[in-house]
Amino acid sequence: MTEAEAEAYHAPQIAALKDGGADLISALTMNYADEALGIVRASQAAGIPVCISFTVETNGRLPDGSPLKAAIERVDWETGNAPAYYMINCAHPTHFSHVLESGGEWLSRIRGIRANASAMSHAELDEAEELDDGDPQDLGRLYKRLKDMMPHLTVLGGCCGTDHRHIDAIAHSCLTA
């Protein structure tokens, strides 16, 4: 979708959510900046804050090949920093932690992580015949490393393959260590 197509497509949903009492729009698993821009513009028009959550492939780049940093900076630049914050979801921490280690002001815009339990690629997960639930304790340790690197992270959760064991490990690692 182009930015304009994404805005037109998502605007009725965003308006309905606002009319229904929502106080924040959360757009998960964004694959490219144009759709994110359309959602942000529709949220701006509706007068409701928005969180944009990008997904990345095993190389830390969005599925369209864009660097995560470039996508966040583009959306912020073109919307006057309109998103309330950004998140990363539907990817294992080993797919993106190296990108976050580069540092920079853009990292302060990322406030949430909802990682996959499995370190498999999206393509491998799509082909898998059984759920790969990874290692909950290792995932908790990886979240702790991310939280140490970015202390402003406040939204922590799980995506594909996670369950109560993963959330418990994340909470234990990040809140008690």
Image (cartoon, helix red, strand yellow):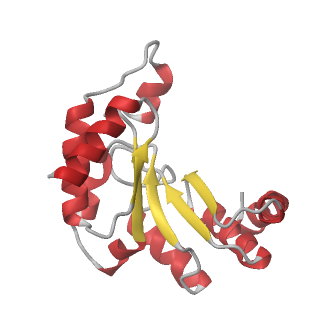
* Residue 103 visible in this rendered orientation of the protein: yes
Q: Residue at x 42, y 29 (%)?
A: 161
Q: Residue pushed farthest bottom?
A: 80
- 123 and 91: which one is in front? 91
Image quarter hosting the N terminus:
bottom right
Image location (x, y in percent) of residue 100: 27, 63
Is 88 on the left or on the right of 137, as rendered?
Answer: right
Q: Residue at x 26, y 49 (%)?
A: 143
| 52 in relation to 142, above or below | below
Q: Quadrant of residue 14?
A: bottom right
Q: Residue at x 20, y 64 (%)?
A: 149
Q: Quadrant of residue 15?
A: bottom right
Q: Residue pushed farthest left?
A: 177
Is 37 on the left or on the right of 7, as rendered?
Answer: left
Image location (x, y in percent) of residue 107: 33, 72
Image location (x, y in percent) of residue 121: 38, 34
Is 5 on the left or on the right of 99, as rendered?
Answer: right
Q: Residue pushed farthest front?
A: 176
Total marks drawn?
A: 0
Image location (x, y in percent) of residue 146: 24, 57
Q: Residue at x 64, y 73 (%)?
A: 49
* Residue 118 visible in this rendered orientation of the protein: no
- 52 and 31: which one is in front? 52
| 53 in relation to 134, above or below | below
